[in-house]
Image (tube, rainbow, N blue to C red):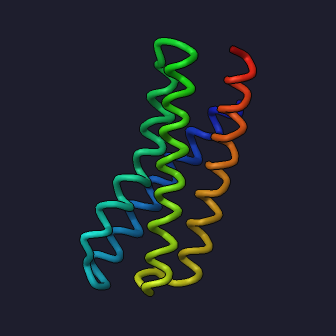
Amino acid sequence: MKENKLIELSKMFAVDIVNLCTDIKENRKGNVLLNQLLRSGTSIGANIHEANYASSKADFINKFQIALKECYESDYWLGLFKETKMITEIEYADMYDKCSKIRKLLIASINTAKGNQ
């Protein structure tokens, strides 16, 4: 059940990242850094999805750890965009909250998977 929620949250987060980056590019100053956020923000869900087809428990854990790293990277870019006024405080708070929920679920899932080894 937890993993289905994680898949759904990470996919919605990716959609929000794409929409945010599109809005920044179209309506604000376009920036090369957008690609960094776009890559890390959408990679989270891709790695979680790929983990469902892992060849082993170690492979599963590795995919989730990669997703967690991408989550931390997305958090970094969102913070940088907030500090440089590329996104508003409200946009940041919303995206940070979503990213934090995914991060917490990833950490819990990794710890559970490691405990079951």
- Residue found at x 64% / y 32%: 3
- Residue found at x 46% / y 75%: 80
The quarter of the rendered structure image containing the C terminus is top right
Quarter residue 35 falls in: bottom left
Quarter residue 64 falls in: top right
Nearer to the camera, 29 or 113: 113
Tally of marks: 0
The quarter of the rendered structure image containing the N terminus is top right
Residue 24: x percent and y percent?
34, 77
- Residue found at x 35% / y 75%: 23
Residue 59: x percent and y percent?
49, 20
- Residue found at x 57% / y 16%: 57
Is 18 on the left or on the right of 29, as rendered? Answer: right
Is 30 on the left or on the right of 57, as rendered? Answer: left
Above or below residue 80? Residue 56 is above
Residue 58: x percent and y percent?
54, 18
Nearer to the camera, 113 or 50: 113
Is 28 on the left or on the right of 42, as rendered? Answer: left
Is 22 on the left or on the right of 97, as rendered? Answer: left
Residue 116: x percent and y percent?
73, 17
Quarter residue 19 falls in: bottom left
